[in-house]
Image (cartoon, rainbow, N blue to C red):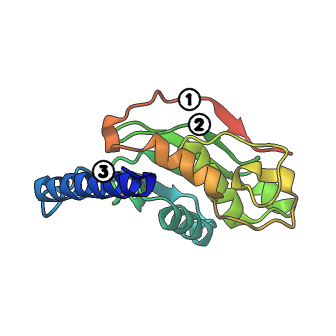
């Protein structure tokens, strides 16, 4: 048998085998794939800002920034008289917060210090930064303005109150799978003085 005829016969046989295998696979495939991805539960954390007079607008903006940028955790204002996981108070010192990640039923403290405002730092950035600590993010000093957790090292001209992709990913990871994913509360107090 000439070489051309053998190649043609071999190619035809391979095509028949491939077509048969493809048809068998297609017949065995289900018409609709069941969803294996389950929607993860969103962790809701309540905050109490009843002792943070003068910071209301910054708190609203800082909370809105986190809520707009992460999906696994949501911050909501606690109803008067109900317990809160994040207690926010206004102080005269430097801003500081307990390093989380805080979980429902646990509690951390955020102190919004006026000394930083007096020196020219942006109130909304301060608030979003301190909330970031409560959600488990440490400082990344020194750092650029694009890093929310660079805090005061970004300078007084920095007003960025939005977490960057890395910061968002770390918070999403800390709160993945809802409250079932229990990481220990670090508990360190991080003071954000320059």
* CB-based contact (under 8 Å), mark 3 and mark 1: no
* Residue at the disc numbered 3: 40
Element type where label 3 sits in the image: loop
Mark 3 or mark 2, which has the lower sequence index? 3
Q: Residues within 10 Å of mark 2 (few under 14, many from 20)?
A: many
Query: In the rendering, at what x and y percent does residue 114 appear?
Result: 75, 57
User: Could you tell me residue 76's position as x and y percent?
Assistant: 40, 61
Q: Residue at x 55, y 50 (%)?
A: 169
What residue sits 57% from the left and 64% below the top? 59
Instruction: Answer left or right for 167 relative to 69.
Output: right
Q: CA distance from mark 1 to mark 2?
A: 5 Å
Disc 1 + disc 2, Cβ < 8 Å: yes
Is the residue 181 above or below the residue 22 in the image?
above
Q: Which mark is residue 99?
A: 2
Front one among 96 and 52: 96
Residue under label 1: 187
**Does residue 159 appear to the left or right of 184 in the view shown?**
right
Distance of label 3 from label 2 (alpha carbons): 24 Å
Q: Of label 3 and label 1, which has the lower sequence position?
A: 3
| Front tag of 3 and 1 | 3
The single residue placed furthest to the front in the displayed view is 1
The x and y percentages for residue 161 are 67, 64
| C-alpha separation, residue under disc 3 versus residue under disc 1 | 26 Å
Callouts 3 and 2 close, C-beta under 8 Å: no
Q: Is residue 90 visible in this depiction of the protein?
A: no
Instruction: Please state which of the two labelled residues, at mark 3 or mark 2, is closer to the viewer.
Output: 3
Q: Is residue 162 above or below residue 150?
A: below
Q: Residue at x 40, y 36 (%)?
A: 106
Asked which secondary structure carries label 1, the reply is loop
* Quadrant where the image shows the C terminus: top right
Residue 150 % position (x, y): 77, 50
């Amino acid at each position: 048998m000439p070489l051309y005829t053998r190649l043609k016969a071999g190619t035809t046989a391979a095509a028949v085998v491939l077509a048969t295998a493809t048809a068998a696979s297609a017949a065995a495939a289900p018409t609709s794939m069941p969803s294996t991805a389950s929607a993860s539960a969103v962790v809701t954390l309540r905050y109490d800002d009843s002792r943070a007079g003068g910071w209301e607008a910054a708190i609203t903006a800082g909370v809105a920034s986190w809520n707009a940028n992460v999906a696994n955790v949501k911050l909501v204002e606690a109803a008067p008289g109900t317990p809160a996981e994040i207690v926010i108070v206004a102080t005269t010192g430097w801003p500081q917060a307990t390093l989380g990640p805080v979980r429902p039923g646990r509690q951390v403290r955020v102190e919004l210090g006026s000394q930083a405002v007096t020196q020219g730092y942006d109130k909304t950035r301060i608030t979003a930064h301190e909330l970031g600590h409560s959600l488990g993010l440490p400082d990344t000093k020194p750092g650029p303005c694009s890093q929310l957790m660079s805090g005061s090292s970004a300078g007084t001209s920095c007003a960025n109150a939005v977490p960057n992709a890395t910061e968002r990913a770390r918070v999403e990871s800390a709160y993945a799978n809802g409250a079932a994913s229990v990481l220990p509360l670090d508990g360190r107090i991080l003071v954000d003085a320059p």
